[in-house]
Amino acid sequence: MDNTDFNGKLAQLLFPDIDKTPDYYEKLYPDRGLPEGARVTRFAPSPTGYLHIGGLFGALVDVLTAKVSGGVSYLRIEDTDKKREIEDGVSGITDGMKAFGVEFDEGVTGFGTEKGNYGPYTQSKRVEIYQTVAKSLVEKGLAYPCFCSADELDQIRSEQEKEGAAIRGYFGKWAKCRNLTYDEIEKKIKNGESWVLRFRSDGSEERRVFFDDVIRGKIEMPENIIDEVLLKSDGIPTYHFAHVCDDHFMHTTHVIRGEEWISSVPKHIALFKACGFRVPKYAHTPQVMKIDEETGDKRKLSKRKDPEAAVEYFITEGYPKEALIEYLLTVISSGFEDWRRANPAVSAEDYPFNLKKMSSSGCLFDIMKLRDVSKKIISTMTADEVYSRITGWAETRDPDLYSAFTSDKERTVAILNIDRDVPKPRKDIAKWNEVKDYYSYMFREFYTNDLVLPENISPADAVEIVSEYAGVFSLEDDKETWFNRIKGMCDSLGFASDNKEYKQNPDKYKGNVSDVVTVIRIALTSRAQTPDLYPIMTILGCDEIKSRLEYAASFWKGMLPNG
Ligand code: GLU
């Protein structure tokens, strides 16, 4: 039997039910007809139900790369490894993406749903495609069945170890099934022996492969010589083979993925070439790192040790989606912060992202920096916006906060508006789970008295201040009159109403007007620092103010020697 006959017969023996050819799929998935330079990218996670922050980071790079080039990004679920899969592991990924507004043009949109013309976008639904390509590889003599059992493979491994072989795996002299005859194969198949399909590599240890990584530049590596498994014994492809077929038929131009895949590139290039597919461009993104709190060393964000490794964490904590995205962009792209300074009001989605400007070294995730970014973003939102975000977050996560906030919407919005609608809004809140504590003094249900005076104020003076203030405050006052009233109390209490005067003669006074305001603030809010006290008082209302001032007076009186 000559080789063509052998290959043709073998292909038919191995895949009797496959009646299509790769050409059929070429026509089914035609060129996308995109303009020159448009990039097609994909995010291709396994459905483990867990979205790592590195995944969101990678997805963002995919979406932005496609967007700035007028291309297409899509989400493909790589579920060929059933061992790693969990039931409905897809929603965890798509929900995480949605929560942070990362939207693909095509692909899987949720559990059992998808959009786009190049689907199905879930690998387990594409088995016929892989088997069709696999059959064509057998026809070309580029793949063969391997009947080696797990024990035989173990034995090969241990012999390679004993020999100290530099390269380990199924190749060359170790590849026992590479040269089986048709009759031998047929017999084994008739006997019901299980087989996997292996790639017939023509790689050489002496040769090198070169590729241009968009982020890392030129990379040179030894050629692949391993006869990699393409289809497992159940006919399901390995990741290596499946993604090659998918990236081809889905017309991926740029494979953007984590740097842990760099070592597999020679294998992937060999597979693309064997299949007659154009090799895509590669961009391997750096891993997300953090500084270890104990050792001070840089290390990979770990699913086990770091709650912030999971995107879910940021949803639960209540970080606004824009904050995480904005922060990730500062980490991903060295030019982002300059661009942001020049374009403060433009949406981050419109950032002219450039893959080439990505750093290739591990990017450092710094939660304190995220907090700062988030505070800034929240400070620029309107009170109505903040109200709807907080209530949306709290509805399922903090029912007490939800009911307190929604029981009087107008009042809550007024609270949220304090120090917001001003030229320099306060940057105090980083995430929604801080809100309850931050505004606790505005809600009876959350407020607890904690009347700690600063060291420079004696309880006796504090009693005098609040007792006097209880008699003079008026909610009819405008802000200036309100402040003048406090100033007016100062001199008789021994505090300077005028700051300049106080600075010149500090010894003449017990303190100045701001100390008096602080005492009133503590009496009303149990805090030495709050946003503007004037609107706080207008919202608290007369009765509440009176009762808090009375309580404070009696509390501090209780601290006096004869109190
Ligand atoms: N399914 C692979 C993973 O989950 C993706 C690798 C790739 O993007 O090519 O790591």
Image (cartoon, rainbow, N blue to C red):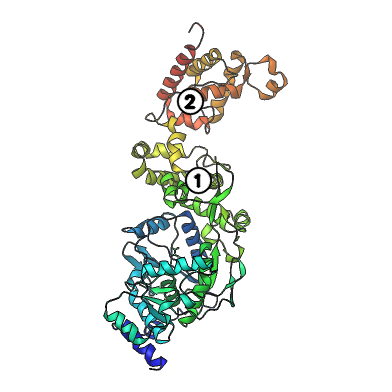
Q: Percent from the top left, x then y, of residue 479? A: 54, 30
Q: Residue furthest right?
A: 504
Which disc is residue 526 wearing? 2
Q: Percent from the top left, x then y, of residue 318? A: 43, 45
Q: Quadrant of residue 335?
A: bottom right
Residue at the image position 47 percent from the left and 83 percent from the top: 276
Above or below residue 300? Residue 358 is: below
Which disc is residue 378 wearing? 1
Q: Which amino acid, mark 1?
A: Ile
512, 213: nearer the viewer: 213
Residue at the image position 48 percent from the left and 16 percent from the top: 471
Task: Tell which circle, 2 or 1, labels the residue nearer the N-terminal end.
Answer: 1
From the viewer's perspective, tell me whether residue 16 is left or right of residue 473.
left
Mark 2 C-beta to ligand 1 under 8 Å: no
Q: CA distance from mark 2 to mark 1?
A: 24 Å
Mark count: 2
Label 1 residue SS: helix
Q: How many neighbours does mark 1 have within 10 angstroms: few (below 14), some (14-19), or many (20 or more)?
A: many
489, 155: nearer the viewer: 155
